[in-house]
Image (tube, rainbow, N blue to C red):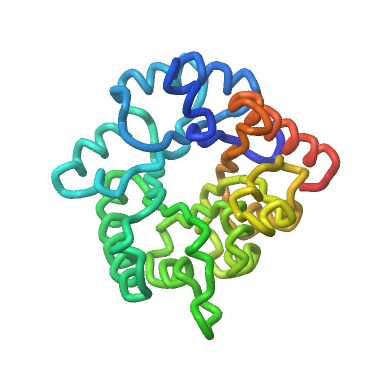
Amino acid sequence: MGQYAYAVELYSVKDALAKNMPDTLKKIKAMGYIAVEFAGNFVHTAAEVRRALDEAGLICCGWHTPVEYLADDRFEATVAYFKTVGNEHVIIPGLPEEMTGSREAWLQTAALFNQYAARLAERGLRLGYHNHVGEVALYAGSRDCPLTVFGDNTDASVIIQMDNGHVLNGRGYPMLDLIRRYPGRFTSVHLKPYSLAKGASDPEAGYQTMIGEDDVPWKEFMALCRSIGGTRWYIVEYESPELYPELEGVERCLNALRDMEKRGVI
């Protein structure tokens, strides 16, 4: 393994995962990945997931967890599930409009995250948030955006899981400046290629590209993650099944990253 610990966001291979979870995990391990991040509802029992991970030889480096799983009536069950699976990172992948629709809503959301983070920390777990496109859009007449309001008002222990493709697509707060603004908080990041040219007329089309053929400033991004971001897990998220099938796509992404390492690009 090189200097980066690569994982896969399993939403990238959701169809294969739905058909055969244990087999899919073994295929991911065979590609050379060392960890996976699950996403969404608990479809399998915790014991089934742990068994499949152990048989494949993979680590669970995170789980994109619906925020309602942290409500009082589900909190203990969620913690128990993650303890069995071996997951330490509870990453919220998105929030409803009432929690994100205004600066005030983001302030209230940040306060709630601080409460959740403190409660999870007592159980040895960490909380995080995964950004989307609109969260880096600058407020009118301001150098701030929803993600900076969130970051400025959450505890330093709360992970900011940057999706670099979404940040590039957002064309708002600069990607590299976000890492500089919140050193040590990017414990895991999503590696998602994005083409500005392809996304010029249709922003969604910008994702139809591959790592190494896109406009993410990989050299600077990876260097900052390594030097000040506190990044442990570099998680590939592949959203271009029109180009290559799911499993082939995530394998190509890993090969591209390894090639950039060999060439000293990252």
Instruction: Give the image quarter of residue 96.
Output: bottom left
> In the rendered image of this protein, does residue 76 appear above or below residue 145?
above
Q: Nearer the viewer, residue 128 or 10?
A: 10
Q: How many marks?
A: 0
10 on left or right of 209 = left
Give the percent coordinates (x, y) of residue 198.
71, 51
125 on left or right of 152 = left
Residue at x 41% of width, y 43% of height:
89
Q: Residue furthest right?
A: 263
Q: Residue furthest front?
A: 201
> In the rendered image of this protein, does residue 226 appear above or below residue 21?
below
Q: Nearer the viewer, residue 210 or 198?
A: 198
Instruction: Give the image quarter of residue 202.
Output: bottom right
Q: Quadrant of the N terminus?
A: top right
Give the percent coordinates (x, y) of residue 4.
66, 40
Residue at x 30% of width, y 49% of height:
67
Give the percent coordinates (x, y) of residue 261.
78, 40
206 on left or right of 9 = right
Give the percent coordinates (x, y) of residue 156.
43, 63
Instruction: Give the image quarter of residue 102.
Output: bottom left
Q: Residue furthest left?
A: 73
Residue at x 67% of width, y 58% of height:
201
Q: Residue furthest bottom?
A: 141
Residue at x 53% of width, y 33% of height:
12
> In the rendered image of this protein, does residue 107 appear above or below residue 70?
below
